[in-house]
C-alpha cells in the first residue's frame, strides 16, 4: 500500500511539474522579433480594428419604415443614415413612392444586377443621374 501511494504521489508531482512547464507564460520567439529586453521601433498595430460605425440600436418597425421612406425621398436624410439600410433599387423606389405618392419607373440598378443592394445616398444619386429631380410633383 505504501509503495502504491509513493508511486501515485510521484506521478502526480511529475504531472504537476509538466503542467506548470507547458503552461508557463514564457515569451514565444518569432522570426524577426527582437530579443527579450529589446524594444521594437515600430508601433504595434491592433489585431482587430473597430467597426466604422457603432451598431444602431433596434428601432420600432413603424419608425424604421418612416426613416427609410424619408431617406428615399430626401437627400439630407439619405446622407444621415449612411449604410444603415441597404435595399435594392426597386425597394427604394417603393419607399420613395410612399414618400411622394408617385411611382418611379426608371431603372436605377446596375445593368445585369437588379438585386444589387445600395444605400439611400447612392439611390438618390442614381435618381438625379436619371433626370429625376426629386421635387414633389415635378419630374425633370
Image (cartoon, helix red, strand yellow):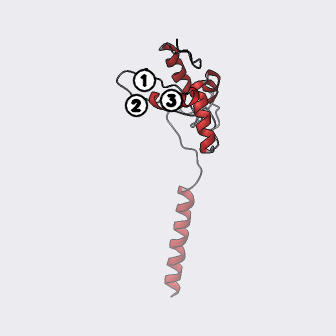
Q: Earlier in the sequence, mark 1 or mark 3?
A: 3
Q: Secondary structure at mark 3?
A: helix
Residue 122 or residue 49, whichever sits in front: 122
Which residue shows up at 53% across the image and 72% down it?
12
Check disc 2 and report the residue beneath it: 115
Residue 88 or residue 82, whichever sits in front: 88
Check disc 3 and report the residue beneath it: 92
Q: Earlier in the sequence, mark 1 or mark 2?
A: 1
Q: Whole-percent x and y of residue 92? A: 50, 29
User: Marks 2 and 3: which is nearer the front?
Assistant: 3
Label 1 crowding class (10 Å Cα cut-off): few <14, some 14-19, many 20+?
A: some
Residue 28 lies left or right of residue 43; in this view the side is left
User: Marks 1 and 3: which is nearer the front?
Assistant: 3
Q: Whole-percent x and y of residue 43? A: 63, 29
Establish if 46 lies above or below 12. above
Kindly indicate whether the residue at mark 2 contacts the one at mark 1 (C-beta within 8 angstroms): yes
- Residue 94 shows which numbered tag? none
Establish if 49 lies above or below 111. below
Residue 27 lies left or right of residue 31; in this view the side is right
Q: Earlier in the sequence, mark 2 or mark 3?
A: 3
Label 2 crowding class (10 Å Cα cut-off): few <14, some 14-19, many 20+?
A: few
Q: Tell me how far mark 1 sits from mark 3, CA to CA.
A: 10 Å
Check disc 1 and report the residue beneath it: 109
Which residue shows up at 52% across the image and 61% down it?
18
Q: Tell me how far mark 1 sits from mark 2, CA to CA.
A: 8 Å
> Residue lying furthest left in this view?
112
Establish if 21 lies above or below 96. below
Q: Tell me how far mark 2 sits from mark 3, CA to CA.
A: 12 Å
Which residue shows up at 52% across the image and 11% down it?
140
Q: Whole-percent x and y of residue 111? A: 37, 21
Q: Secondary structure at mark 2?
A: loop
Instruction: Decide if residue 82 is in sight here.
Output: no
Amino acid at each position: 500500500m505504501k509503495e502504491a501511494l509513493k508511486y501515485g504521489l510521484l506521478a502526480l508531482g511529475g504531472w504537476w511539474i509538466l503542467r506548470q512547464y507547458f503552461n508557463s507564460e514564457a515569451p514565444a520567439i518569432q522570426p524577426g522579433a527582437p530579443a527579450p529586453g529589446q524594444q521594437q521601433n515600430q508601433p504595434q498595430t491592433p489585431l482587430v480594428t473597430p467597426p466604422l460605425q457603432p451598431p444602431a440600436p433596434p428601432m420600432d418597425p413603424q419608425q424604421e419604415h418612416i426613416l427609410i421612406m424619408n431617406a428615399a425621398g430626401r437627400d439630407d436624410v439619405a446622407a444621415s443614415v449612411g449604410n444603415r439600410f441597404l435595399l435594392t433599387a426597386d425597394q427604394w423606389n417603393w419607399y420613395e413612392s410612399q414618400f411622394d405618392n408617385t411611382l418611379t419607373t426608371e431603372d436605377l440598378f446596375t445593368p445585369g444586377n437588379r438585386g444589387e443592394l445600395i444605400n439611400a445616398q447612392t439611390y438618390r444619386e442614381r435618381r438625379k443621374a436619371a433626370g429625376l429631380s426629386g421635387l414633389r410633383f415635378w419630374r425633370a
